[in-house]
């Protein structure tokens, strides 16, 4: 796909969801450029500013612009589906087979992350680090729910053999979970009771495509937002509190 014009991935230094898109682009060997945005309402750099709202009316990353098709997509699940339809002719990311059951299984595990584990993890981050006044009860509630879903995924990995979430091949289900499991270390959640999930997480982060995706976002951050690069995985607490942007996670 070297003849393709580079796609433009709109990302944030610490947000998990843009990482999903970068991983898919790396696996599909699609050229891309990363543009870094911050969680504020600045017109030039902010996801709530007028420039970015024209790209994504929800004012959140990721968004993806494809100059080869003139398609703009936002929401990580929608973007991954677009990339599969447009560029995954070899089924590197799709369902295990063409059966309706395989497709249904893939969507179910994707949506469990998108609708449940991702939002619950985001709420843990918010109530542990940013909410004022501190609310330990709310944090404990969401931590309990995150661990509950870890248990669901652990059981699935036992059924699948442990290498991938769905038995037989790597899919976008794995991509959806990868960056959110990275967040577990940041929020201090132990995987000791979930050995298969812990092993899967390590295996995924050892994949060259995952390493390259993370490095691309890191390099773009270092070039475009050096202060954010110095913070590493940790967002700007003051900025997060000011904007109420718990959606960063």
Image (cartoon, rainbow, N blue to C red):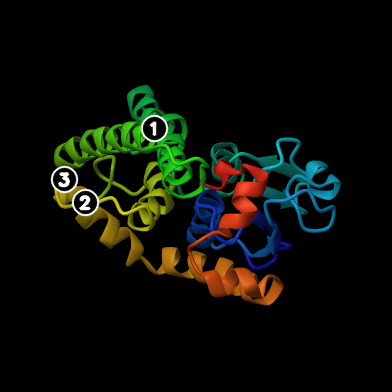
**First reached walking from the N terminus: tag 3 or tag 1:** 1
Which residue lies at the image location 21% right of the left edge and 51% below the top edge? Answer: 191
Report the residue that reaches farthest toward the front. Answer: 133
Q: In the rendering, at what x and y percent does residue 108 appear?
A: 38, 28
Q: Looking at the picture, tell me which residue is in the foreground, 58 or 231.
A: 231
Q: CA distance from mark 2 to mark 1?
A: 21 Å
Left or right? Give the position of 96 relative to 199: right
Q: What residue would you read off at disc 1?
A: 138
Q: What residue would you read off at disc 2?
A: 191
Q: Is residue 103 above or below residue 193?
A: above
- The kind of secondary structure element at disc 1 is helix
Q: CA distance from mark 3 to mark 1?
A: 35 Å
Q: What residue would you read off at disc 3?
A: 161
Q: Looking at the picture, tell me which residue is in the foreground, 75 or 50.
A: 50
Q: Nearer the viewer, mark 3 or mark 2?
A: 2
- The kind of secondary structure element at disc 2 is loop
**First reached walking from the N terminus: tag 2 or tag 1:** 1
Q: Is residue 177 above or below residue 26?
A: above
Q: Residues within 10 Å of mark 3 (few under 14, many from 20)?
A: few
**First reached walking from the N terminus: tag 3 or tag 2:** 3
**Quadrant for the N terminus in the image:** bottom right
Q: Is residue 204 above or below residue 58?
A: below
Which residue lies at the image location 38% right of the left edge and 25% below the top edge? Answer: 104
Which residue lies at the image location 63% right of the left edge and 65% below the top edge? Answer: 31
């Amino acid at each position: 796909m070297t003849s393709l014009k580079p796609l433009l991935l709109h990302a944030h230094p610490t947000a998990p969801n843009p990482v999903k898109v970068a991983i898919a682009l790396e696996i599909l060997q699609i050229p891309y450029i990363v543009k870094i945005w911050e969680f504020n309402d600045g017109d030039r750099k902010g996801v709530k500013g007028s420039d970015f709202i024209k790209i994504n009316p929800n004012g959140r990353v990721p968004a993806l612009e494809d100059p080869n098709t003139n398609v703009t997509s936002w929401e990580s699940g929608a973007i991954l589906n677009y990339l599969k339809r447009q560029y995954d002719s070899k089924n590197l990311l799709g369902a295990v087979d063409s059966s309706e059951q395989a497709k249904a299984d893939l969507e179910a595990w994707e949506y469990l992350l998108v609708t449940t584990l991702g939002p619950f993890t985001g709420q843990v981050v918010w109530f542990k680090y940013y909410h004022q006044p501190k609310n330990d009860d709310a944090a404990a509630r969401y931590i309990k729910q995150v661990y509950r879903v870890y248990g669901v995924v652990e059981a699935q990995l036992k059924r699948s053999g442990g290498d991938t979430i769905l038995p037989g091949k790597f899919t976008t289900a794995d991509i959806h979970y990868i960056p959110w499991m990275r967040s577990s270390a940041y929020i201090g959640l132990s995987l000791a009771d979930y050995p298969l999930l812990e092993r899967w997480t390590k295996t995924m982060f050892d994949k060259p495509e995952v390493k390259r995706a993370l490095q691309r976002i890191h390099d773009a951050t270092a070039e475009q937002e050096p202060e954010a690069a110095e913070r590493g995985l940790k967002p700007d607490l003051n900025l997060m509190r000011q904007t109420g942007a718990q959606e960063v996670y």
